[in-house]
């Protein structure tokens, strides 16, 4: 298994191109199931999760082609995927595929909306919490589907198709909002989704669905209204920039000091995180090219942060902020309200010398003068990148094991960081 070796202590300077958002790409690819025409997605990141979802969709009958490089294409440009679900030949998403990636459960909405039936494996456990699928199922029931659970599979059926309905979520859920939105797009009549997630990735998917002919109002607010249509068409859509990748590199620069342009990044997608970085002492500049981030000389100030649904501070940047605060001049507090078990990086950060104590959902981070390199183990995607951030500032060598977690969500991480002066390399095997 590959590892990543980091020799800490270098400042970062230069430019990092920000890739297309993983968490928009996955539901956008799934949206291809809603139409028998071709959906073209541009700026798709090269990630293990994208490849895995291609296999899952191919199993349902989706033809997928990847456009080759064109003359004049800037290096590191995103990929273009063409997805054609002309005929769905299989409405089952089997355990061995769904268990590898939770988001693949989301095929359930489009399958039942278009085919009147879906048989999708329950996703099962996951490193960052229990993450049930009850909200997804409630949404489908509200649109007239019958749900049964048999042998670990959810069987959803709607003979004669889904019909519009009122869906109200007790808690904000990104995935269940995607399910509701995609299903309602093909349901007969009008649907209303209340307490919907307002994440930028929901807006991106809604924008793409609208290009496909869906009638949607209010995406990006807590109430989304959808007027179902009989069929959806071909469309061409460019994936929005990854706000979590942006925030991660911004924190890396704040950690090491230096000056980096995050090319193509959009500040409106992560204002809460940028505010926290400024409070901690980093400088943030919005420019036409992207977001420039710098920290020179100043010590990091401690912060108090609570993770919240958008537009609050994202849970997907919690581990990275914790790594950053491990070197602040004072004690920080981070409260995790989205997932009950998203603190597995704490023990690993401690191996590098971080002083963190946990009390339920609250972590107290007492800043230390220096971190020291050590072998560490990645446990999930965002946790692993927090170890990279800590390693960039630690004295000596940090070896991050189980790098496959990183490959799920960060495109060419070592290359992007080493071009800015970091000493970081992948060690094969
Ligand atoms: C999405 O997961 C993201 N995944 C996650 O990113 C992200 O951490 C999360 O949203 C929160 O922002 C993708 O977009 C592919 P939720 P999702 O449903 O949709 C509870 C990453 O690192 N819940 O918004 O699965 C759930 O347990 C990943 O890129 C139910 O109780 O998250 C959690 O406490 C990790 N019942 C809360 O809601 C349900 O049916 C929010 O989860 C569904 C969710």
Image: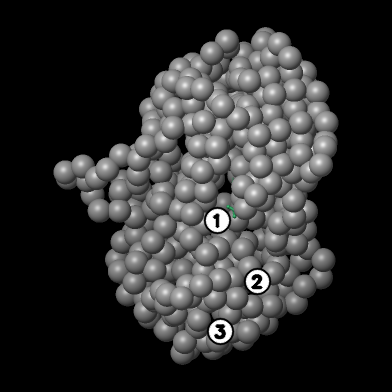
User: Would residue 132 be found to the left or right of residue 313 on screen?
Assistant: right
Residue in the picture at 56% in, 84% down:
375
For the residues labelled 3 and 2, the Cα–Cα distance comes to 13 Å
Q: Which circle marks residue 375 in the picture?
A: 3
For the residues labelled 1 and 2, the Cα–Cα distance comes to 19 Å
Based on the displayed image, in which of its 4 quarters is residue 228 positioned?
Answer: top right
For the residues labelled 1 and 3, the Cα–Cα distance comes to 29 Å
Q: Of marks 1 and 2, which one's residue comes earlier in the chain?
A: 1
Residue in the picture at 44% in, 32% down:
63
Is the residue under label 2 in contact with that under label 1 (CB below 8 Å)? Answer: no
Q: Which circle marks residue 273 in the picture?
A: 1
- Residue 387 locus on image (x, y percent): 55, 73
SS at mark 1? helix
Q: Which circle marks residue 345 in the picture?
A: 2
Q: Residues within 10 Å of mark 3 (few under 14, many from 20)?
A: some
Q: Is residue 229 above or below residue 359?
A: above
Is the residue under label 2 in contact with that under label 3 (CB below 8 Å)? Answer: no
């Amino acid at each position: 298994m590959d590892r990543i070796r980091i020799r800490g202590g270098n400042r970062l300077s230069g430019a990092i191109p920000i890739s297309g958002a993983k968490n928009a790409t996955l539901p956008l690819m799934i949206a291809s199931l809603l139409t028998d025409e071709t959906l073209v997605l541009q700026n798709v990141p090269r990630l293990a999760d994208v490849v895995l979802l291609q296999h899952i969709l191919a199993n349902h009958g989706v033809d997928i082609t990847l456009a080759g490089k064109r003359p004049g294409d800037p290096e590191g440009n995103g990929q273009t995927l063409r997805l054609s679900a002309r005929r769905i030949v299989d409405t089952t998403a089997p355990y061995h595929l769904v268990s590898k990636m939770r988001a693949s459960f989301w095929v359930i909405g489009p399958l039942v909306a278009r085919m009147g039936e879906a048989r999708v494996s329950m996703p099962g456990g996951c490193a960052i919490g229990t993450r049930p699928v009850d909200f997804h199922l409630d949404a489908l029931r509200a649109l007239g589907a019958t749900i049964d659970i048999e042998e670990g599979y959810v069987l959803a059926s709607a003979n004669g198709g889904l019909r519009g309905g009122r869906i109200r979520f007790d808690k904000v859920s990104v995935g269940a909002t995607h399910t509701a939105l995609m299903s309602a797009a093909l349901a007969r009549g009008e649907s209303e989704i209340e307490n919907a997630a307002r994440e930028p990735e929901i807006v991106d998917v809604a924008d793409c669905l609208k290009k496909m002919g869906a009638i949607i109002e209010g995406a990006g607010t807590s109430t989304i209204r959808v007027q179902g249509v009989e069929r959806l068409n071909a469309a061409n859509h460019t994936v929005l920039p990854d706000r979590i990748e942006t925030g991660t590199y911004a924190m890396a620069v704040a950690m090491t000091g230096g000056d980096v342009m995050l090319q193509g990044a959009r500040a409106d997608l992560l204002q809460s995180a940028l505010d926290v970085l400024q409070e901690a002492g980093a400088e943030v500049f919005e420019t036409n090219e992207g977001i420039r981030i710098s920290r020179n000389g100043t010590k990091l100030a401690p912060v108090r942060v609570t993770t919240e649904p958008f537009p609050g501070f994202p849970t997907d940047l919690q581990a990275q902020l914790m790594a950053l605060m491990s070197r602040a001049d004072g004690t920080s507090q981070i409260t995790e309200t989205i997932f009950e078990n998203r603190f597995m990086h704490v023990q690993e950060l401690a191996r590098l010398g971080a002083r963190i104590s946990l009390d339920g959902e609250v972590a107290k981070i007492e800043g230390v003068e220096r971190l020291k390199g050590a072998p560490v183990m990645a446990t999930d995607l965002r946790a692993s990148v927090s170890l990279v951030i800590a390693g960039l500032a630690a004295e000596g060598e940090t070896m991050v094991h189980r790098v496959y977690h990183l490959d799920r969500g960060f495109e060419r991480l070592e290359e992007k960081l080493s071009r800015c002066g970091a000493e970081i390399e992948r060690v094969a095997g």
